Amino acid sequence: MLRGPRGWSAARGGAQEQGLGGNVSTLKPGLVGRATLLVGEEHTAPQIGSGRVHVLATPVMINLMEAAALDAAEHLLPAGHQSLGIRLDVSHVAATPVGMRVRATAEVVEVAGNRIVFRVEAHDEMDLIGEGAHQRIVVDVGRFDKRIQRKLGGTPQL
């Protein structure tokens, strides 16, 4: 069980851990990840700053979907690599009150080079509450960190 920010948890889906060597070839369509959350007041729109109604905030639902995507794929990446979210196209279609449990799933639908595409859904105890697509890219952490350090040392462009 993985524990993340804001109280979500993720349990590994159907994917099995494997060593990858230096590639992402074991990432295949059909891998599924899951994450769950018991909605508390801290997960509501007023607490997050995204509205006034005391129901699950859209940014928290999206965070749960990303957690499910991580659960599906992150543990299969080669050592020294991680995935970064680059695109979300999500609809939040039903409200979830405090006290209900939410379950997000992310299924790998495409792997192209270093890009992973997921179909994501979230359900509360009664309804489908959100759905859409999410994309992540796989990066070499060392190279990524060097790029960030160069950016920190540069002159602001603003």
Image (spheres, helix red, strand yellow):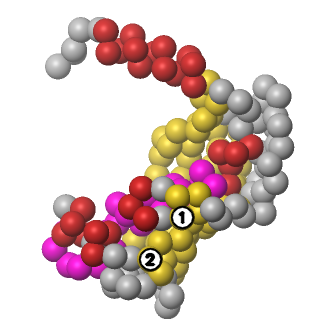
Q: Quadrant of residue 158?
A: top left
Residue at 82% across / 54% down in the picture? 16
Q: Earlier in the sequence, mark 2 or mark 1?
A: 1
Is residue 81 among what the camera can see?
yes
Is residue 95 among what the camera can see?
no
Q: Is residue 70 left or right of residue 98?
A: right
Residue 38: image tag? 2
Residue 3, given in percent of the width and then of the height, sits at 52, 58
Residue at 57% across / 25% down in the picture? 141
Q: For the N terminus, which image quadrant?
A: bottom right
Which region of the structure is painted magenta? 50-71
Residue 111, given in percent of the width and then of the height, sits at 72, 43
Q: Neighbour class for label 1 at 10 Å: few (<14), some, many (≥20)? A: many
Residue at 29% across / 8% down in the picture? 154
Q: Secondary structure at mark 2?
A: strand
Residue 126, given in percent of the width and then of the height, sits at 49, 91
Q: Quadrant of residue 138?
A: top right
Q: Nearer the viewer, residue 98 or 104?
A: 98
Residue type at the position of mark 2: Leu
Q: Which residue is mark 1?
A: 9
- Kindly report the distance in space between the C-alpha atoms of the residues bearing marks 2 and 1: 9 Å
Q: Is residue 60 magenta?
A: yes
Residue type at the position of mark 1: Ser
Residue at 58% across / 38% down in the picture? 83
Residue 114: image tag? none
Main secondary structure found in the magenta portion: helix
Q: Is residue 91 magenta?
A: no
Residue 58, given in percent of the width and then of the height, sits at 34, 66
